[in-house]
Amino acid sequence: MSHDEKGKWWVSPSNYDEEVRQDYHFAPRIEILDTTLRDGEQQAGIVLNLKDKVKIARKLDEVGVHRIEAGTPATSDEDAQAIKEIAALKLKAKIFCFCRAMPKDMELAKSLGVDGVICEIIGSEEMLKFGKRWTPEQAAAACIEATKVAHDMGLYVTLFPADGSRARLQYLIDFVDKVSAQGHIDSLALVDTFGAFSPEGAALRIRKLKERFSFPVEAHFHADYDLGVASTIAALKEGAAVAHVSVNGIGERAGSVGLEALAVCLEALYGVDTGIKLNKLLELSALVAELTNFPVAPNKPFVGNRLFGWSTGLPSSLWTNAKQENPLIMLPYHYDLIGAKEPVLYLDKKSGKDNLKYWLKKVGLSVPEEKERELLDLAKAKSLEVKRDLNEAEFKELAAKVA
C-alpha cells in the first residue's frame, strides 16, 4: 500500500516514509473484536433485545469482524439466550462472552456454545480496594479458579483486568503472572477503562507486557480523552494482536474505539489491512444507530451523513473543477471506500456561483445569467433567516421570484 493508493485515498507521503515505518512492530495478523453487543450496550440509554443483537451480529460478521463479544450472560436470561442464538448461527467470527471471575459464569458461557470468555476482574489496586473492597489475594484467587474451569471446558480465556491502564505496572505484571502460573490465560487484555492512556503510555505498557509474557496482548481502550483510536493504534504498533472496538464508538461515558475509525485509519494511514470490508461500514453504522436509538453526528468521521459536501464557495468550486479528473484533490479518501455517495453542494450564506449552478441543475430550473447574482443573494439572505442551508422547496420558491 502507499500514500496514494489506487484512487482509494491520498494522504501525506510522510506517513509511508521509511524513517517512520521502521519503528512499526505490527503483529502479522491483527484481529478485531467488536464489543457493540456488550460494552456498546453499556452506554447509558441503550437497550438491545435478542432480535436486535442477532441482527447486529450477522452484520458484524458480514463486515468481517474476527471476534464478536456477544454480551454478558449473567445480565439476564434474554442476554444469555441472545448469546446462545448468535453462537448457533455458526458465523465466521469467533463468539465470546463477558464473564465475572466465577466458575458458574464460565459454566453458563460453555452451555451457550461460545468459543471463548473474557474474564473480568478489577485490575488496579485502588479500584479493587475502594470500589470492590477486595484484596489482591482475593482477586487473584477468583481468577485462578475461574480461568482453570473455563480452560478445562475448552474455552479460550482472555483475562480482562479492568482499569489495568492506571495500575502500577509492576502490580499488574505480578497479578497477571500469578494468574498465569496457577490458573490459565490464553490472552491478556490491557484495559483502559477510563480512556486515560496517552498513545505513548499505551505503547510503553504493551511493550513491557509483551517483554514479560508470551501470550498475545489485546487492547481495550475507551475515548474519555478522545484518544482511543490513536492509543489503540499505538498499542498495535507495539505488537498488540487484537483491538477491541464498537460500532459508532458507543460505550460507557464517552464511548469506546470506533470500528470504522480504527479500520480505515489502519488501512489508509498505516498500510495495515485488517480484512474489514470498509465499504460495508456505513450500512453497519446505520443499523446500529437505528437499533440503539443513538443517532450519529452528521460530521462524525467516516459515518456522518454530511461528511461529503460543501457549502462554502471556494471549496465548492475546487470540487467542481477537480472531481472528474481526480476527486482525491478535495478528499482525504474516496467516498466509494466506505460505501458513501458522491459529495453534494449545499446552499447557504457562504455559497458561491458553483453552488448556485449545482442547485439549478439539481431542481431542473434555469434563470437568465444576469439574474444569477440576484438569486444567490436571495439564497444567502434566506439562509441567514432560517440559520441553515436551504432545502429544495425554499430554493424553488426563490428561483420562481427571480424568474
Image: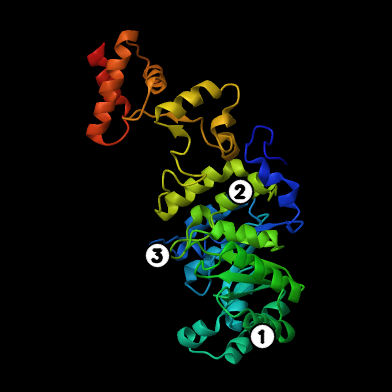
Amino acid type indicated by mark 3:
Ala
Examine the rendering and report whether any part of residue 165 can be seen.
yes
Relative to 345, 140 lies left or right: right
Q: Gap in Å between the C-alphas at discs 3 and 1?
A: 32 Å
Q: Quadrant of the N terminus?
A: top right
Q: Nearer the viewer, mark 3 or mark 2?
A: 2
Q: Crowding near pointer 3: few (<14 within 10 Å), some, many (20+)?
A: few
Q: Residue at x 22, y 33 (%)?
A: 385
Report which residue position mark 3 lands on: 44
Q: Position of residue 285 (x, y in %)?
A: 50, 48
The disc at residue 144 is: 1
Label 2 SS: helix
- Can you tell which mark lies on residue 265? 2
Question: Relative to residue 58, is residue 186 depicted above or below?
Answer: below
Element type where label 3 sits in the image: loop
Pick the quarter of the image with the C terminus.
top left
Cα–Cα span, label 1 and label 2:
38 Å
Please name whichever residue, 362 or 377, is drawn nearer the observer in this view of the structure.
377
Q: Residues within 10 Å of mark 2 (few under 14, many from 20)?
A: some
Crowding near the residue tagged with mark 1, few <14, some 14–19, many ≥20 C-alpha atoms within 10 Å: many
Quarter holding residue 152: bottom right
